[in-house]
Image (cartoon, rainbow, N blue to C red):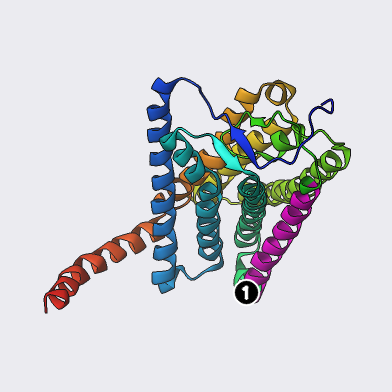
Amino acid sequence: MLPGNKTQISEFILLGFSEESALQSVIFGFFLSMYLITVFGNLLIIQAVNSNPHLHTPMYFFLSNLSFVDICFISTTIPKMLVNIQTQNKVISYEDCFTQIYFFLLFVQLDDFLLTVMSYDRYVAICHPLHYTVIMNARLCALLILVSWMIGALNSLLQTLLALRLSFCTVLEIPHFFCEFKEVIQLACSDTYLNKTVMYFAVGLLGGGPFAGICYSYSRIVSSIHRISSAQGKYKAFSTCASHLSVVSLFYCTVLGVYFTPAVTQNSHSSATASVMYTVVTPVLNPFIYSLRNKDIKRALRKFFRMATILEPIVLRQRKC
């Protein structure tokens, strides 16, 4: 971008998906429903895991952490978009934009790491079942979560601080529904070579590394399943991984499409649409794909609702007294 009227800016304009006023109510209703489903569904998973001692295992520990991160992930972008549609104001302040960038990068990285950790958990459970409880002990599980948060926080901080040093021109329209990092950098008048180099290096290292780990885990899992003699045993082993693998594929394909596909890169509308897949659709699918098909989670949810039904009259009676 050629240096134009460089000035100290205070806000950006989020263009969103469509300028047509007739579509705004449809877009608002769609994203509001998706947001509520995501928050409510993932909160149910967290509550079910925490309230049932039988679910205090590494697999469900990672699942509850993924649910928490998905709630934070979708809450980083969707509430602001809903407010902008409702108020018919597309402005986001400079400070809010870079705050959104930081937390978006943090939670997308955590999503990536947690999917990798969950694939490792399934690898140990299927390939080394006799040593599963020894390998996946509480200390290792907590350490994996802590390291994921530390790396994600440091990477997000580095990317955000490098972006804060940029100077911006008077053209401050972001063709997106949130402050997407790549789109914000393209608005800068100053040199962005360092920002782009660090961004693609981080995507390659912190995205490619976990992806390679997932591929390795599943290659060993497929090999182990192939050696199982009974068809029922093969189906049971594969069913624990199929849902996770489908979400991993959805997540990586859309992220890679946004950042590396020329057709999407050159078309801002396509980029925004593709971003919906991993910022909205993936968190929405988490409760359904990972848990509602799981008998243990179903049993825990039924127990939770049964207890809530029993306790509700008692609470109401105490309030009357």
Give the residue displayed 78% in from the left and 35% down from the top: 188
Check the image and report above or below for 43 versus 32: below
Of 79 and 84, the residue lying toward us: 84
Of 186 and 309, the residue lying toward us: 186
> The C terminus appears in which quarter of the rendering?
bottom left
Task: Determine whether, in the image, residue 241 is placed left or right of residue 215.
Answer: left
Q: How many marks?
A: 1
Of 191 and 142, the residue lying toward us: 191
Residue 299 is one of the magenta-drawn residues: no
Residue 73: x %, y % from top left: 56, 50
Give the residue displayed 50% in from the left and 48% down from the top: 239
Judging by the rendered image, the residue that carries numbered circle 1 is: 137
Give the residue displayed 86% in from the left and 41% down from the top: 197
Q: How would you rate the neighbour count of disc 1 (Cα within 10 Å): few for under 14, some for 14-19, many for 20 or more?
A: few
Q: Secondary structure at mark 1?
A: loop
Residue 235: x %, y % from top left: 50, 47
Residue 157 is one of the magenta-drawn residues: yes
Residue 117: x %, y % from top left: 65, 58
Give the residue displayed 46% in from the left and 44% down from the top: 284
Which of the 4 quarters of the picture holds residue 55? bottom left
Amino acid type, label 1:
Asn
Residue 136 can be seen, yes or no: no
Which of the 4 quarters of the picture holds residue 200? top right
Check the image and report above or below for 226 versus 298: above
> For the magenta stretch, what is the residue range?
136-162
